[in-house]
Image (tube, rainbow, N blue to C red):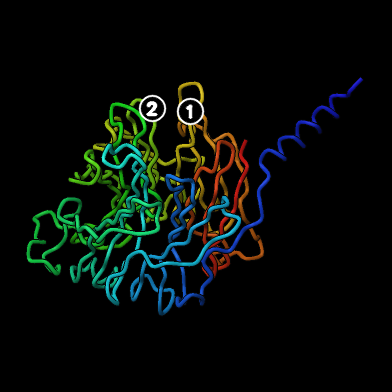
């Protein structure tokens, strides 16, 4: 007769195998390919299944402002190897960053699918823009061939931003004055079900004028298009000061979850905002006590349905004090509970050195999630494949 202990051990072994992870593969290495630093990863699966890994290639150092361009590498073998780097977007010798890619599979004009890459440019540092000097703009490019080539950039700033009067364009003058501005970081989303079937939603954040502290002048919001990039509309602002660097996921019945970092840092947990109308306005805002966060970026992803509810995956450094212990969590009830926890990367001896930081996630088949993340004090961006079921 098989003992209860043997049965328990068997279940444990099976469970461990189901969540086994691969070793990480280096994708962007600081000091190579003409860039001293790489940061802000984003990843999607192209219509043909190719993985596209984006990042900011920082030419002269690790600073958030400077000569920065958006770079891309491709993988045709589920992340085991990566092709040569290409430059997708740049802004002279100034800043092009915050890549937010998404695949549009529902535009009848492009039956093979089209990729949007939303990004930001900046004329001054974030601190200068917050003080009313310079401007952050919003653009997009598209690809009809799975990321091999890209269109000319389209500037959508006046549709999705409320920039200050000191911008480079005299039209940038609004009574409601937004200053700094950033997409996501990470992927954007497209609705896969009615009533908002086909809507593309990009999570974003901005800072507001006349604020006394950078910790309270940031607010999350989003923007969206229902006509495949012809026109855009702004969502309402999330009514919680400090909400910043957000990622979005589609829920059931047209709802949407926005998951944000708390810039204030007083509560080291993720901020969650729920919309019941496709991201237009926000019904509920709360701190998710199940998701500790060290004031860092995180990524959320819809990974399919179970019993009529959307399954979600979420990834962030799951510590309150340090950017370390990158962890993937799975929810089968649209984020009400996170019942599955899978370690991605951790080094307890590297505390205070940002061992793991920003990340983005992508579905690879029905049972695996690819994690593209910053590692080893921002010296690497690596990819790891996680088998979660």
Q: Earlier in the sequence, mark 2 or mark 1?
A: 2
Q: Which residue is outermost to the right?
A: 1
Q: Residues within 10 Å of mark 1 (few under 14, many from 20)?
A: some
Work out which quarter of the rendered image holds the N terminus and state it: top right
Q: Are marks 2 and 1 in contact (CB under 8 Å)?
A: yes
Residue 353: percent from left, percent from top: 56, 68
Q: Of 385 and 347, which appears nearest the observer? A: 385
Is 229 positioned to the left or the right of 194 in the image? Answer: left
Q: Mark 2 falls on what kind of element?
A: helix
Residue 72: percent from left, percent from top: 43, 62
Query: Does 200 sit above or below residue 137?
Result: above
Query: Does 361 sit above or below residue 366?
Result: below
Q: Which quadrant would residue 341 be assigned to in this image?
A: top right
Q: Which mark is residue 252?
A: 2
Is 293 positioned to the left or the right of 142 in the image? Answer: right
Give me the residue at 50% from left, 66% from top: 84
Instruction: Report which residue position mark 1 lands on.
Output: 305
Q: Mark 1 falls on what kind of element?
A: strand
Q: Which quadrant would residue 124 be assigned to in this image?
A: bottom left
Q: Which quadrant would residue 173 be assigned to in this image?
A: bottom left
Give me the residue at 66% from left, 56% from top: 23
Query: Does 177 sit above or below residue 96?
Result: above
């Amino acid at each position: 007769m098989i003992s209860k202990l043997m049965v328990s051990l068997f279940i444990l072994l099976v469970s461990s195998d189901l969540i086994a992870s691969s070793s990480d593969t280096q994708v962007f290495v600081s000091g190579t390919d003409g860039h001293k630093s790489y940061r802000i990863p984003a990843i999607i699966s192209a219509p043909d299944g190719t993985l596209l890994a984006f990042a900011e290639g920082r030419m002269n150092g690790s600073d958030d402002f400077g000569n920065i361009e958006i770079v891309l590498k491709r993988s045709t073998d589920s992340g085991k190897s990566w092709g040569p780097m290409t430059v997708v977007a740049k802004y002279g010798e100034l800043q092009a960053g915050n890549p937010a890619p998404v695949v549009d599979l529902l535009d009848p004009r492009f039956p093979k699918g089209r990729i949007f890459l939303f990004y930001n440019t900046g004329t001054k540092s974030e601190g200068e823009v917050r003080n009313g000097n310079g401007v952050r703009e919003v653009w997009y490019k598209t690809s009809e061939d799975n990321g091999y080539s890209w269109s000319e950039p389209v500037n959508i700033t006046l549709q999705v931003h409320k920039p200050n009067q000191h911008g480079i364009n005299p039209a940038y003058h609004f009574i409601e004055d937004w200053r700094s501005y950033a997409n996501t970081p990470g992927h954007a989303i497209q609705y896969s079900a009615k009533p908002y079937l086909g809507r593309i939603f990009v999570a974003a954040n901005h800072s507001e004028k006349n604020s006394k502290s950078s910790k309270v002048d940031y607010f999350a919001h989003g923007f969206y298009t229902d006509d495949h990039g012809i026109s855009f509309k702004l969502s309402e602002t999330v009514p919680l000061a400090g909400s910043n660097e957000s990622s979005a996921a589609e829920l059931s019945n047209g709802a949407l979850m926005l998951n944000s970092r708390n810039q204030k840092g007083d509560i080291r947990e993720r901020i969650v905002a729920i919309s019941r109308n496709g991201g237009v306005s926000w019904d509920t805002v709360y701190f998710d006590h199940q998701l500790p966060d060290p004031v860092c970026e995180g990524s959320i992803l819809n990974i399919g349905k179970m019993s009529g509810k959307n399954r979600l995956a979420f990834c962030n450094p799951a510590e309150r004090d340090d950017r370390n212990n990158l962890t993937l969590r799975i929810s089968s009830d649209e984020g009400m509970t996170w019942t599955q926890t899978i370690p991605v990367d951790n080094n307890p001896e590297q505390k205070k050195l940002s061992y793991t930081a920003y990340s983005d996630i992508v579905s690879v088949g029905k049972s695996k999630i690819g994690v593209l993340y910053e590692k080893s004090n921002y010296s690497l961006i690596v990819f790891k494949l996680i088998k979660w079921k």
